[in-house]
């Protein structure tokens, strides 16, 4: 009986050997290196195609940064000596404080007026002031700072550096 059992096991081993030889795949070292290089190149190509595609998608609808020269100008701090020398017309505004939102500052006139038109289409009262070489875009005239802050929260979505300023 033992011999019969051994014959059965031998028979199955021979069958397994035939299957292994039939589907035998040999990977030599040079084939393995070539396959790994091809896989690496595929990964690099797919990554670079993804980067190019991503850049195209992010640039849709945006203007070129090199076209625009955006400068942020901090509000001027007036010393006490300069306040004393200010004209009497300026003193009449001190009693009633008017707040506005400084949205952006541009060097180029065309870009500043383009932004003004965009803001006016959205329904904001816009004014442009010239400060030296810069054109400063202001939105609204508000009687208190809280009112200006409410409008500024809407503008912050597009103009991240906008701030409330007193006139």
Image: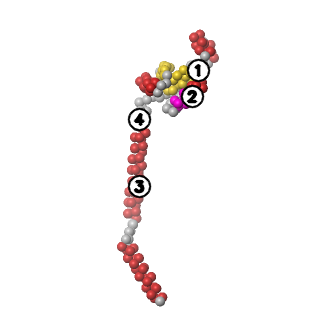
Q: CA distance from mark 3 to mark 1?
A: 64 Å
95 up-or-down from 15: above or below: above
Q: Nearer the viewer, mark 3 or mark 2?
A: 2
Q: Position of residue 25 (x, y in %)?
A: 38, 69
In-image side of 60 versus 163 (left or right): left
- Identify the main secondary structure in magenta: helix
Of the two numbered discs 2 and 4 in the rendering, the one whose residue sits closer to the viewer: 2
Res 65 quadrant in image: top left
Q: Mark 4 or mark 2, which is nearer the start of the sequence?
A: 4
Closer-to-camera residue (10/86):
10
Q: Measured from the top left, where is residue 51 in percent x and y? A: 42, 45
x, y (%) of residue 133? 47, 21
- Identify residue for label 1: 143
Crowd rating for badge 2 (residues with CA inside 10 Å; few <14, some 14–19, many 20+): few
C-alpha distance separating marks 2 and 4: 27 Å
Q: Which mark is residue 61?
A: 4
Secondary structure found at label 3: helix
Q: Earlier in the sequence, mark 3 or mark 4?
A: 3
Is residue 119 visible to us here? no
Which numbered disc covers residue 84? Answer: none
- How far apart marks 1 and 2 lie (CA) works out to 13 Å
Q: Which of disc 2 and disc 3 is earlier in sequence?
A: 3
Residue at the disc numbered 2: 150
Spatial CA distance of label 3 from label 2 is 53 Å
- Magenta range: 150-156
Which residue carries the number 3 mark? Answer: 40
Mark 1 touches mark 2? (CB < 8 Å): no
Labels 3 and 1: the sequence-earlier one: 3
Q: Nearer the viewer, mark 3 or mark 1?
A: 1
């Amino acid at each position: 009986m033992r011999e019969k059992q051994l014959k059965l096991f031998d028979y199955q081993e021979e069958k397994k050997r035939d299957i292994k030889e039939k589907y035998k795949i040999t990977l030599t070292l040079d084939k393995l290196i070539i396959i790994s290089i091809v896989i690496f190149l595929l990964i690099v190509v797919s990554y670079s195609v993804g980067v190019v595609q991503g850049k195209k998608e992010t640039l849709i609808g945006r203007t070129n940064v090199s076209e625009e020269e955006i400068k942020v100008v901090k509000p001027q701090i007036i010393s006490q000596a300069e306040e004393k020398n200010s004209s009497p017309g300026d003193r009449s505004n001190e009693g009633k404080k008017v707040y506005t939102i400084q949205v952006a500052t541009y060097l180029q006139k065309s870009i500043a007026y383009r932004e003004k038109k965009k803001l006016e289409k959205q329904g904001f009262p816009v004014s442009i002031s010239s400060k030296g070489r810069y054109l400063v875009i202001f939105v609204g005239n508000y009687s208190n700072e809280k009112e200006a802050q409410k409008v500024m929260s809407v503008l912050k979505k597009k103009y991240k550096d906008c701030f409330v300023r007193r006139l």
